[in-house]
Image (cartoon, coloured by chain):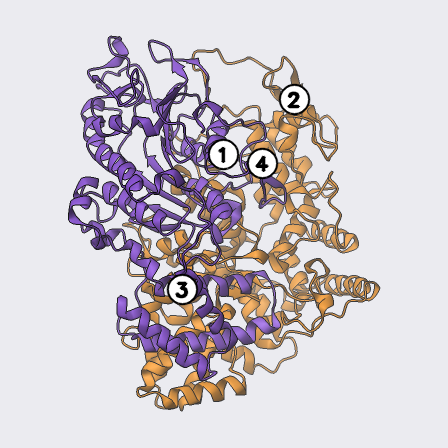
Chain colours: A orange, B purple
Amino acid sequence: MNSFRPWAALLGVVLACAPSRADRYAGADELAARVDRLLEGAWKKADVTPARRADDAEFLRRVYLDLAGRIPSVTEARSFLADRRADKRKRLVESLLAGPRFPTRFASVWRALLLPEADVDLRVRLQGPAFERWLRSWLASGRGYDSMVRELLTASDQPGRGRLAVSPLGIFYVAKENKPEEVAGTASRLFLGINLGCAQCHHHPFADWKREQFWAFAAFFSDLQPRRVDRRAPRERLRPAELRIPGTEKVVRAKFLDGKAPTLGGGTPVRQVLADWMTAPDNPYFAKAAVNRTWAHFFGTGLVEPLDEMAGTESVPSHPAVLAELASAFAKQKYDLRWLIRAITATRAYQLTSARSHPSQDDPRRFARIPVRGLTGEQLFDSLAQATGYRDDGAAGRRNPFGIGTTRNEFLTRFASSERPTEAQTSILQALTLMNGKVMSAATNVRSSETLLAVVDAPFLDVPGKIETLYLAALARKPTSRELARLTRYVGRSGTEGEALADVFWALLNSAEFVLNH
Amino acid sequence: MSSFNDLSRRAWLRLTTLGFAGVSLSGWLERLAEAAAPNPARKRSCILLWMNGGPSQMDTFDLKPGHRNGGPVKEIATSVPGIKISEHLPGVARQMKRLAIIRSMSTREADHGRATYLMRTGRAPGGPIQYPTLGSLVSKELERPSAPLPGFVSIAPQRLINAGAYGPGFLGPRYAPLVVGENGRGGRRGDIARALRVDDLDLPGGVSERRADDRLGLLDDLNKDFLAERPGGSAVGHRTAYQRAVTMMRSTAIKAFDLDEEPAKLRDRYGRNLFGQGCLLGRRLVEKGVPFVEVSLGGWDTHGNNFEQVKRLCGILDPAWSTLMDDLADKGLLDSTLIVWMGEFGRTPRINGGNGRDHWAASWSTVLGGGGIKGGTVHGKTSPDGLTVAENPVKVPDFLATVGTALGLDITRQNNSNVGRPIRFVDPGARPIKEVLT
C-alpha cells in the first residue's frame, strides 16, 4: 500500500481541481432514475413486491466491500451513521471512488478475470503482482475502460529476454501460451461476452458461430508465436493476419465477428485494427459486455447470464431495456467506469435490503432484493485485518516481493474460490481457520488484539457501549436492543469481562453476517 | 482428546436442555450420534499414491534390460510368472497378484504444471472452466453427508506448481480436500506424526471447552437471526461447514489422525517418513469411511543422477506401498479400496548427458490395484527402445474412466460447471480398460 501514497496524493490534487461532485454525477442520477423506472415497471408486471430500502449501516458495509474490498472502520462507520446530510450515500460512493482502495479492489477483480492462471500456475503467479500494478495504475488514472482493453490487446509479448523477463502485459500472452486461439477466445469472452470455445473445434452447437469464423477472428493474433510441439518442423510462412485451421489445409484471413473484413495494410498494426473495432462506440457487444459484468459485480447476477455468453446464444437478458440504457450511456461517457458505478450504486435496486420480506423476492434475476454473496479471500482477510487491527508480521515487501509464506497469502490459498458469488460455499478447513486459526486467535485474545484491548480498556465505555463498539468493528452496525440485552447479560454473568467480550467478538467475526456480503 | 468428547457432549446437553442453544444444536447432536453408528453400506474407497515430478517408467515398471536406453537397473521376478519389475521394488513385486500395470500411457503434456492438471482433472488446462480434481469428483459421489470426516483428504501435497489441479474447481469449497502435511512440512527431520495432524483443530490457547461451547451458543444466536431473514445457499452453506467442522473436532473419528495409536512395529514397516506414515494415515482414514485419500511423494523430477534418485525414492515407496496393501488386506479393506499409483508423466527412455532422464508423455506407466482391479495383469506394451507405445495406447480420459468404474461410479454423471454448462465426470468417449477391471 505504501507505494501508492504518491499517486493517491496526486489524485487528491486532480480531484480538487476536478468539477464539483454534482457535475461528476451529471447524467448518472438521470440514468439511475431511468433504470429504476424500468425495474419498477418489471416488478409491477410480474407482481413482485421489492424489499424495503437498506438502512444506512447495511448500505455502508455493502458499498465498502464492493468498492474498497473491505469493511469500514469503527470511525468510518460512526461518522457515516451520524451524518445527517440527505446525499450522504452519494458522498460516500464518491469518496470511495476517489480513495486508494478502489483501484486495488478493481485491479484484483480484473486480474482474476484476465489472468486466472496466476491462481494455479507458479510461473504466472510470479508476474501476477506486476500485472495487477498495471491494472491499478489504469484505474487510478481515471482513463476509460476501453483504454485498458486497447493497451492489453496491442501489447507486445516479448520485450525482454528469458522466460520470466516479460512485461506486465506480456504475461497475459505467456499465460495463454501465445496461442492466437487462446488470446482471441479470452478477448471475445471477456470484452464482447461471446464464448467461442466450442467453435474452436466445431460449429457452435447453440449459436451462429462457425468454426471458420472463430479462426478468422483468431487470425488477428497470428503474429503471436506459440511454442511448437515439434521444433524441427519449419515455421509456416503465411501472410500477416493469416492462420491455418489446425488439422486442415484451410488458411483463413482475419475477419471481425460480425463477418466484416478489416482494412489491413495501411500501416496500422493488425491488432490495433482489432482493438479499434472492438472499442468503437457502435460495436454492438463491447459496452453491453462491460456493463453486464459491472452490474454483476454489484448484484451477483448479470442482466444476461452467463456473463461470458451474452451474445449469439439463447441467453436472454432479464431486462433488455436496462442493459441497452446502461450500455449506450457508458459508451457516450467514453467508457468511464467510475461514472457507470455512480449510476449503478445510485439505483433503487442496489439500495434495497438483503432481508427477505416477500417470496417474490427470491428470483435473483428480478433484482427485488440484494442477494447474499460470498467474499473473495482478499475481501475476507482485509476485512478481518480491518476489524481486529491485525498486522501481518511478514507482509510482502522489498525482501519478499511476492509475499510467499505470509499470513495473508496462506489465508488466500485457503480461501481461494471459483464458484459463483451468490452460491458461495465454505469448506471445513475454512471454518476451522476462522474458528481456531492464528489470525482469529490473535484477534480474539485480549492480550494480542488491538481492537479488543482498546474496547476492554476504554474507561469511557460501559458494557453496552463496549458491545456496540465490537458490533461496529465487525458488522458496521449497532446491535439491536434484543441483541444488546442478551449480550450484556452474557458479559454480566461471566467472571471476567475481558474474556466475555472476547467471546462476543469471536462470535461476531465467525458469523454468517461477517463472512458474507449482503 | 478422549475426555474432550464426553465433556463437550455434556456441555451440549446442558445447552440444549436449558433451551439456550435452540433447535439447530440438537440437530448437531443427532449428527454426532449418527456418526458413531457403524455403516453397513460402505462403498469402495480410493487411495491415490501421487508421484510428484513424474517417475521413470524405465526404472520402475517397464524396464528394457539389454537396451541402451535401459540403464543399470535390473529386473526381478514378481509373484506373477512372466511379469518382471525393477529390483528396487521387491515388496511391490510380491504384491503383483493384486496389481495391474498399464505400460501404455500416452498423454500429450510434458510440462509439470499442465500435465499435473491433465492427469488429476482429466482435462487439459486453459479456458474458463475450472475442473475439479479427481478426489473432489469421487468424494462428491461417495461421501456420506453425515460422516464426521470430510470425503477427501490430501496428505503431503506440493500444490505450488499448479494449485488448480488439487482443488475442487467448479464443485466449490464444499468438496475441497482436507490438507495435512503440506509441502513436506515436518519432513525428514521434523515431527512427522505432528505434521500429519489437521491444522487449527485445537481450540485457541486459553479457551476452555466450556468457553468454546459458550462461543458456539452466541454464534448460533447470531446466525439464526441472520438466516431467518436471508434464506438461501450462501448462509446455509456457512452454517453447514461450521457444523461439519465442529462435528469433526468433537468426533472420535478425528483420532484417525493420531498415528500413535498404531503399533510401533507396523509404523516401522510403513517407513518412518512422511510418505510412509502418510500411507498409514491413508489406511486409517479409509477404515473410517473416507472415500478418497491421496498421499504425495515428491522428488521424481530426475533430470540429473536419475538412477541414484530413483533408488532412493523406491526405498521410501516400496515398503510403504507394499505394507499398505498387506495392511488393507489384514483389515479386510483391500477389496473395497482401489489403489492408484501415478505421476503427471513418465521420463525419457533416452538417458541424457547428466545420467538423468527428462520429461516424457508419449509412453509411460501407471499402476492400479486392490478393489475392482484384475490383479496380475499387464496392459499395453512399449517398443523395445521404450520410445513409442506398441500396443493398446491409453489416454487420460480412458485411465480416469477405469478408475471411476473400479470405484463403482457412473462415469457419465454430470455436474454443473462454473460456466453454466453440465460437465461429465470424464470426457464423453472415454472408455474404461476392461482388461484390468474385475
SS at mark 1 in the image: helix
Badge 3 and badge 4 in a common chain: yes
The answer to whether residue B242 is visible is no
Q: For mark 3, what is the residue?
A: B247
Q: Nearer the viewer, mark 4 or mark 1?
A: 1
Q: B391 or B322, which is in the foreground?
A: B322
Q: Secondary structure at mark 3?
A: helix
Identity of the amino acid at label 4? Thr
Q: Residues within 10 Å of mark 1 (few under 14, many from 20)?
A: some
Q: Which residue is mark 1?
A: B405
* Residue drawn 30% across the image and 39% down it: B329
Q: Secondary structure at mark 2?
A: loop
- Inspect the image, locate mark 2, and give the three-letter code of the amino acid beneath it: Gly
Q: Residue A318 in the image: x percent, y percent?
A: 75, 54
* Marks 4 and 1, the one that precedes in the sequence: 1
Between the C-alphas of marks 3 and 4, the distance is: 33 Å
Q: Are marks 2 and 3 on the same chain?
A: no
Residue drawn where x is 51% and y is 81% of the image: A478
Do marks 2 and 1 share a chain?
Answer: no
Which numbered disc, 2 or 3, marks the residue closer to the eye? 3
Q: Nearer the viewer, mark 1 or mark 3?
A: 1
Which residue is under mark 4? Answer: B412
Residue B282, image quadrant: top left
Of mark 1 and mark 3, the one earlier in the sequence is: 3
Residue flagged by tag 1: what amino acid is it?
A: Thr
Give the CA distance from mark 4 to mark 1: 10 Å
Amino acid found under the numbered disc labelled 3: Thr
Are circles 2 and 3 on residues that touch, CB within 8 Å?
A: no
Q: Chain of mark 2?
A: A
What residue does disc 2 label? A265
Disc ID at residue B181: none
